[in-house]
Each structure stands twice: as C-alpha cells, then as structure tokens.
Image (tube, coloured by chain):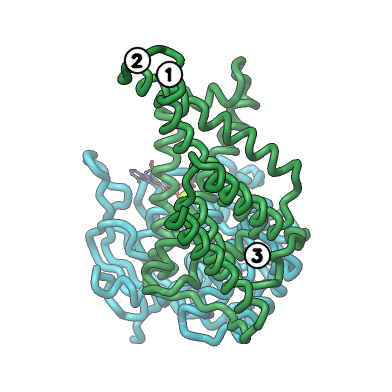
Chain colours: A green, B cyan
Amino acid sequence: MEQREVSGESRGLIPPHLTLLGLVCAMIAVLVSSPLTPTGISWMILTVLLWALFFGTGLKDLLVFTGALLLLFLPLFLITWGVKILSLQGSLPERLWIAAAVPASLVSRGLMLSLLTVTTLKRLSEAELHEGLCRVPGPPVLAALMTGIVFQIRSLSGETTRMMQSIRVRGHKKSAFYSMITALPTVWLPRVLFRSHRLSDAMTVRGLETTAVPFQRYGFSLRALLTSALFLLWASVSVVLRVML
Amino acid sequence: MTTPLLSIVNLSVPKKGRAEPLLDKVTLFVEKGERVALVGLNGSGKTTLLGSIAGLFRHEGEIRVEGELLTSKSAATIRGKLGYLFNVPEDQLLFPRVLDDVAYGLIRGKVPLARAHEKALEVLKTLGIEQLAHCTVHNLSHGQKQRVALAGALITGAPLLLLDEPSAALDPVAKMQLAKVLRGITHAGILCATNDLEFARAFCHRYIFIEAGKVVPELVDEAAILARWGLSDGRSPV
Ligand SMILES: Nc1ncnc2c1ncn2[C@@H]1O[C@H](COP(=O)(O)OP(=O)(O)OP(=O)(O)O)[C@@H](O)[C@H]1O
Ligand SMILES: [Mg+2]
C-alpha cells in the first residue's frame, strides 16, 4: 500500500498548522471583500485562484468543484431571491434586479469560502490535517475535541459509503442516493449514534480525553516564516482595500 | 495466597427494563501469565463481560485488577493496566496514520515520540504488518485494521489483555501468527473472547464457558463445549 501521493506547491513548504493559518487568512480576505463591487469580486476570485495555485489544484478540479458547489447553492439563492422579490415594491424588472443583490453576495461568499476549504482538504492528507489541527495552540482538551471532530467526520463518511453500498447491493430500484435520503432517519441515524457511542467508549478506554498528542518538532525555516508573513499580509491588504474603497 | 491478576466475584450487569440481566453472578479469576479463552455463543455476554472490566457498564459485584477494586474513581487507573481489543476494530483506531495509532499507548505513558515510534514499528513487525506503518488507517482492509488495533493493544505491555474476538477477521496465516505472538506473552494475563476453538487451542491454557450471561463452571474442555453445542462429531463450530 502506498501513502497518498505527495504533490502540490504547498507540500513540504510549511508545516500543516501554518497551512491552516493560510486558510484562515484567505477566508478573511474573502469575508472582508465586498462581493458587489468589481474590485471586491476580483479580489475574492484572485484569492481563490492564488490559493488553488499554492496547492497545485488543477483547473479541471477547480471547475468541477465550482460547478458542484453552484448546484448546492442554487436552491438557497432562488429561495432568498424569491422572498426578497415578494417583499419589495416597484416595477417587476427593477424588483428582480434589486432583490438579487443580497442572495448574490451570500452565494458568492459561500462559494469562495467552500472553494478554499475544498481545495485545502483535497490536498492535505488526513494525517497532516490532524497534525495541523492539534498544533493550533490551545489546551489539550481542545485538540482532543478537534481530533474527535475529524474522526467523526471521517467515520461518518465511511459509514455512509458502506450503507450506500449495502443499499445498492441489496437491490433498491431507485438510485442509491435517493434511498439513502429516505432511509436516513430510520437506518442511518441509529447506526451513527451507536457508532459514536462505541467510539467514545474506545476513547475512554484508551484515555484520549486526558492525553495531549505530541508531534515531531519543526526546525526554524525561513520559507515557512516568509509564507506565513505573506498570508498575514494578504489578509491585511484585503482589510485595507475594503476600508479605502 | 497471592492476589489474582483479575478477580471477578458475583458480577451482574442489569439490562435496562428487563428482568433477566446481561451477566448473572459471574465469578472468575485470571492469574498472571495465564491465557484464558472466554467461549460462548453469540449474545451470551462475552463482549459485555470484557466491557465491564474496563468499566464501560454499570455493574453489581466486584471486579479487581491487581487487587484494585473497580469503581468510578479507580476506572482510569484500571484502564491504564489494560490492553483492550474492541470487537469492531475501526471503533478503536483514533488516529489517521497507523504508526501514530499504535504508538499512542506509549505516548499516553509519556514515552518520547521517537522512542514510541520505534517501539510501534517493532510491534507491527511481530504482527507481520510493518509495511502498513505509514498507511492511512481508514483505507485498510478489515483484517489489517484488526491487526493494527491489536498492535495498539499490545504495545504498552499491559498486565491484563482483554481481547474481543481477535481472530475474527484474520486469514489463517495471520491467525496462527497471532496465536504464536500471544503464546510468547508471559508477563501478562490474557482473557480472550472467541468461538474459534482451533485458535484458542493454539495459545490458551484453559476455557471459561459462558451461556446466557452465566459461567458454566463444569464446562472446561473443548470436547465438553462441543458436546454442549451438539457438535461433538468433531466438526468445529467455526
Ligand atoms: N447496549 C446494549 N443494550 C442492551 N442490550 C445489549 C446491549 N449490548 C448488548 N446487549 C445484549 O446483551 C447480550 C450479550 O451481548 P454481548 O455483546 O455481550 O454478546 P457476545 O457474547 O459478545 O456475542 P457475540 O459472540 O455475538 O459477540 C445480547 O443479548 C445483546 O442483545
Ligand atoms: Mg461480542
């Protein structure tokens, strides 16, 4: 068995927790930019593109993510738009235009934030993400909690995949996804609940609540320092841009 | 008389909303260096018994490990004396990378990281899976996960090993390899839930038979157990 392939510009450049710092900075950049001005929207797109470049995410992947996320956000956009249109007064074309502003800014922000997260998670291996989370300064309990969250997400997705497979193998006519949604409350939930119960038993027996997990130390690296400084600079420039424009 | 490594006296585990308990007045002892197979059909209470020793269930009666009585206060200390293999191995794998998960038991005991990793590699090697050290836990096969979980249970050299069906997912080669590893453990006591009598025969000193939550003290050898199951024509139940 092989470890996940090591690739992308970010690999080995900086330790994982600094990568997470970068993610936070990029998110700040997106959050402070106004999605309704040309400068703001360009700054947001530039941030996402640079981030993708940093991780070596291919253009094709980026387009696929964008498409999938747009589909995900479409219902939200339509609902908020519809509600807003009904609450406004004036001619219809005018109302259509004005009402679009709020949902458009909501969706574009959500889209950019999700793109940042997805590109990061795609590139970081699980072990790196885990290490990054645990290295964020704070009490050990917090790190244990974060470890728990990562694991819950991982085990939930594993559980879901296995259930989808079993639903498919056991011959449901409808698509597996549809069956899973309808089976959600009766099958999925109890399973997940029992599983988390067993997981917490295992954490108790192995003493994970009380132990902080150490990692190997990273030596001082100029590259890491410069990259982190760049992240912080990017976030600050975003704030300045927002205040001045 | 020396204190037994594990002593259980009149242990009962009540079942919520039901008259008959999950475990009913169980009494048993395991000495240091002793390897005991806990045998019983599905639902007989093997997993419940092992879980009670780790303090996972509300119980009545007395459980002692190295003479220390299990209470809600002493539970953490007692867990520190256990190497525990859960029935579902993926439940107990708590780290993304195999090496980190196996080394964790030592790290919990404040062993330096590099030393812990070194020791983890050794244990993985004795179980024949050192090539998995850098793999992502979630991508392993079921049997591989079980062997990784075992490595994590064995690494600390805990005085009492509680193993819940350790051979369940193993291939025949891995199974006999594990039996050999367990035979080599002389510093600890082992209580191993299993219905795989061939596997049990390969490393255990004796059997404890459990049925519907009760230990049946007169059933102490393989032939008697097979007869009880109506399988005495020599066919193994596995
Ligand atoms: N959380 C629970 N709540 C109520 N009853 C339970 C619970 N867990 C197990 N039981 C019941 O307790 C009994 C003993 O279960 P246990 O898991 O100890 O059996 P086992 O001997 O380990 O079986 P197997 O060989 O299938 O692993 C079963 O009848 C089971 O239905
Ligand atoms: Mg069981």
Label 3 secondary element: helix
Label 2 secondary element: loop
Q: Position of residue A180 (x, y in %)?
A: 52, 27
Q: Is residue B20 left or right of residue A173?
A: left
Question: Do circles 1 and 3 both sit on a common chain?
Answer: no
Q: Note whether B138 is above or below A64 in the view shown.
A: below
Q: Quadrant of residue A102?
A: top left
Q: Chain of mark 3?
A: B
Q: Chain of mark 2?
A: A
Give residue A90's mark: 2
Give residue B202's mark: 3
Q: How many marks?
A: 3
Q: Which residue sits at x=62%, y=34%?
A: A68
Q: Which residue is mark 1?
A: A94
Image depth: mark 1 or mark 3 in front:
1
Residue type marked 1: Glu
Residue type marked 2: Gly
Q: Which residue sits at x=34%, y=16%?
A: A86
